[in-house]
DNA sequence: AATGAATGAGCGTTCATTCAT
DNA sequence: GATGAATGAACGCTCATTCAT
C-alpha cells in the first residue's frame, strides 16, 4: 500500500531539513523530492513553517514515547543498573532518531515558533526524567534536580551526536559508550560528597 | 582610540546574530546598528556569511583562550579538586560568552561552511580537554577518552544554557551548579566498575 | 421543484461578488457557498469571468425588465407627474436590486469584457429612457437628450447608492427622496430658459 | 530637470491603473512602464496597495483643491448663475482629471482600504458642496441637502464620464452640456412644489 | 574610503483550471 | 453528471550584492 501523500511530504521534508537546514530547504526542493507539484504541497500544509513544526513534533513525540514508559523504577534492578539502562536506552533512542539530532543541531531556532517547540520538548523530557531520577537523589532540591537532568540530557545528546553522526558509528560499541557516560565525573574518586573548595 | 569600523561591524553583527539568528539578521540591520552605509559593509567583509564566520571564529577563539592555559595539572590540587575547577571554570567561561551559547543554539549550521567551523572548534576544544583529562583516566582508550570529553562538553554546555540563559541566573549559585554537575552519575553508588548487565 | 445547480451557482456567485467583489471572490468560495464540488462549477460555466458576466447580465436584465414596460406615456398623468413616477420607480428598482448597485460600485470593470457589458447595459437603458423622455423635451437634439438621460441615470444611481446602501435606509422616505431628486437645479428659479452667461 | 523616480512611478501607476484597473495592473507592468527594476519600486512604496492609495489620494486631492475655493457665493452672480458656474466648473475639473473618473469606474472597491478612501473623498466633497448650496435652499433639512448633493455629484460624474470618456468629447460643447444638466427635471414645469401624487 | 540607490534572482504562496475516477 | 485532488503559471515581495558618484 502506497503511503499517502502527506506522509511522503513529511518524509521528504524531514530528509531535507536534516540535510540542509530549515532556511536552506526550499519548497521547490521538498516537492521535487516528494515527486509532486508545487501547489500540491499546500493541500497538505499551511506553510513551510507548518511542515517544519509538524516534522519536529513528530520526531520529538517519538522520542517522548520511546522514553516515557520506561518501567525501570519497578524493575527490581539496582539503582546503578537502572541508571545504566536509562542512559543506554536514551542512546538507542537517539540512534534511531538521528534525524532529529541533526535537525536540532542545524536549526537551533529557525523561527520564534520553532524555538517554542524545542523549549517545550526539553521541558517535557526533563519532567519525565525528573520523575524517573528523583527517587535516586531525594536530597536534591527541585532546582538541583532540574539542573542535573538538563546536564544529563546535554551529555547524552552530545555523545550521541558525536558517536552516531560525526563518527558514523552504529550500535556495536553501545555498551562501551554507555559505560563511558556512566563514569563521567567518577574517575576522580567517587561520591565522597566532595564540597566545593 | 575609537574602535575601527571593522570592529564596530563585528560587534553589531554579533549582537544581532545572537538576538535574531543568522537568517533573520539582514545586512540592513547590521549596517544600521553599526551606523554605516549599506555599501560600506562590503569594504570590510566579502559577504554576509563571511562576517558570520568571523564572528563565530572570534567567539570560539575567546573560549579556547579562556580554557587553554588552565594550569590545573600542575597546581597540586587533588584530582577531584582539579576536576571541580575545570567544570567551574568552563561554566564561568560560558557565562561570560553567553552570546556564543545563544548563537550556537540559534544557528545550528546556518550553512555548510559554518558547520565546519563548529566542528573544528569542538575538535580543538576536545583535544585541549583530552590532554587535560588523560592523566586522570589513563586506562581509557583514546576513543573512550574522546567520547568522555564530548559528553562532558555537552553536559556543561546544556547546563550553562539552561542556567544562564533560559533561567537567566547569574553566577550566584555557581558552586551549587558545579556541584550538581560533579555528581552526575554518582548518586548511584560510585565507580564500582559496574558492568553492563 | 428544486432550483437546478446552475441557478444555485449563480445565486452563490451573486451573493459573493456583491459582498467581496470580483477579485476577492474565489471559485472555492462559490462552490462552498453552493454546496458543490470544485469541478462541478466547470460543468456549468466555462470560467470565473463567464459566471461573472452571466450574473451581471441577469441583474441588468432584471433592471431593464422592471424599467421597460413603464406605460407612463399613456397614463394620462401630467408631464411632471410622469417624471415623478419615472424617478420614483427607478429608485424602487434600485432598492430591489441593491446587489447590482453594490456590484457596479465594487467592480467597475473587473475585465475588459465586463466593461463592455456595462457599456451595453447603459446604452440600452439610455435608449429606453430616451424614448420615454423625448416627448417631454422635443426641442432637444438627440445628443442633448442622451446627455440628459445619462445625467439622470447617474443622479438616480448615486442617490440610490447613498440612500439605500451607505445609509441603509429602506423605502420609508421614498417620496421625500424622489422629491429631492425632482428639485435638483430647480431651487434657483425654475425653467426660465436661463442662458449660459 | 528630470522628475524624480517616485513621480515617475506614480505617473506610470496612474496610467496603468486607469487603463487596466487595480487587479490587472501588475508590479511588473508598472516597473517596465517606469523603466526601473522590480526591486526599485519597493524603495519608494511599501506595496502595490500603497501606490494605489497614494495615486488615488493625489487625484482626489486635486479635485478637492479645484473645487474648494470656489468664490461663487461672494461673486455677485444670481443664484442661477452661481449654480451654473458650479456645474460648469465641476465638469471642467472632471475633464482635467479624466484618469480619476476612469479609476473610480474601474476600481469600485479594489480592497477595503481603497473603499474607505473613496468614501472619505465623497464625504469631503459632499461637505464642501453642502456648504456651497445650503444658502440656496434654506428650507431643506440636512438629510435632504445631503441627498441633493450626492445626487448632483452622481449626475455630474456620470455626465462627465459619458461625455469626455465614452464619447471622447473635449470642452467644445461645454456650455451645451452644462445647460442640459441645469435643465434636468426642469423641462416639466418648474418648481411648483408638486407633491408626490 | 564611503555612500546609498539600484538591481534582479529567487522565494513562498495563491488559485483558476483540469482530469482520472 | 459529479467529484476533489492535483496542477503549475504567475504573483507580490525580499534582500544580498553592486557600482556610479
Image: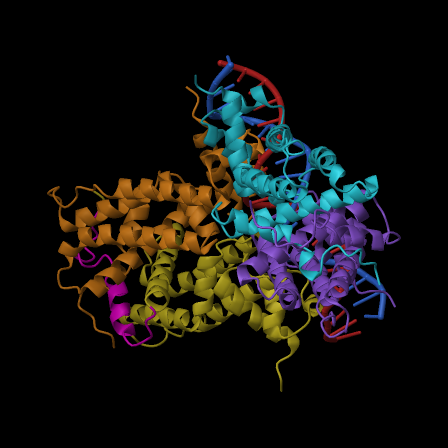
Chain colours: A purple, B cyan, C yellow, D orange, E blue, F red
Instruction: Report the quarter where the C terminus of chain D lies.
Output: bottom left
Residue C148: give x, y in percent of width and height.
35, 55
Residue at 56% over, 50% down = B177
Q: On screen, A116 above or below B130?
A: below
**Rendered view: B93 above or below C106:** above
Q: Who's the residue at 22% across and 64% down the image?
A: D144
Q: Is residue D148 left or right of residue C34?
A: left
**Residue C115 visible in the snapshot:** yes
Asked whether residue A20 is in view, the answer is no
D72 within the magenta span: no
Q: Is residue C185 left or right of residue A184?
A: left
Q: Please name whichever residue, A74 or A98, is drawn nearer the observer in this view of the structure.
A: A74
Residue B64 located left or right of residue D59: right
Most common secondary structure along the magenta stretch: loop
x and y, in percent, of residue C128 in the image:
44, 64
Foreground pick, C191 / C138:
C191
Total marks shown come to: 0
User: Which of the 4 quarters of the picture holds residue B143?
Assistant: top right
Instruction: Give A22 or D168, whichever is nearer the viewer.
Output: A22
Q: Position of residue B190 (x, y in %)?
A: 72, 56
Percent x, y of residue C177? 27, 68
Q: Quadrant of residue B42?
A: top right
The N terminus of chain D: image quadrant: top left
- Identify which residue is drawn at 50% across, 62% down: C20
Start and end of the magenta stretch? C168-195
Direction from residue A131 to residue B96 in the image, left or right: left
Q: Is residue C178 magenta?
A: yes
**Between A128 and A53, which is closer to the camera in this rendering?**
A128
Amino acid at each position: 500500500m502506497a503511503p499517502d501523500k502527506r506522509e511522503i511530504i513529511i518524509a521528504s521534508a524531514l530528509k531535507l531539513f536534516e540535510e540542509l537546514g530549515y532556511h536552506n530547504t526550499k519548497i521547490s526542493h521538498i516537492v521535487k523530492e516528494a515527486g509532486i507539484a508545487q501547489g500540491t504541497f499546500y493541500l497538505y500544509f499551511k506553510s513551510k513553517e507548518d511542515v517544519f513544526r509538524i516534522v519536529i513534533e513528530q520526531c520529538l513525540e517519538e522520542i517522548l514515547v520511546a522514553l516515557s514508559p520506561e518501567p525501570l523504577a519497578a524493575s527490581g534492578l539496582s539503582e546503578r543498573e537502572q541508571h545504566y539502562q536509562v542512559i543506554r536506552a536514551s542512546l538507542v533512542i537517539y540512534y534511531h532518531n538521528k534525524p532529529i539530532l541533526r535537525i536540532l543541531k542545524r536549526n537551533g531556532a529557525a523561527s520564534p515558533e520553532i524555538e517554542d517547540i524545542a523549549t517545550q520538548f526539553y521541558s517535557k523530557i526533563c519532567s519525565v526524567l525528573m520523575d524517573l531520577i528523583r527517587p535516586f537523589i531525594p536530597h536534591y532540591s527541585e532546582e538541583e534536580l532540574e539542573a542535573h537532568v538538563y546536564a544529563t540530557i546535554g551529555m547524552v545528546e552530545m555523545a550521541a551526536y558525536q558517536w552516531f553522526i560525526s563518527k558514523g558509528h552504529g550500535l556495536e560499541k553501545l555498551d562501551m559508550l554507555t559505560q563511558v557516560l556512566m563514569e563521567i565525573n567518577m574517575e576522580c574518586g567517587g561520591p565522597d560528597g566532595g564540597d566545593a573548595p
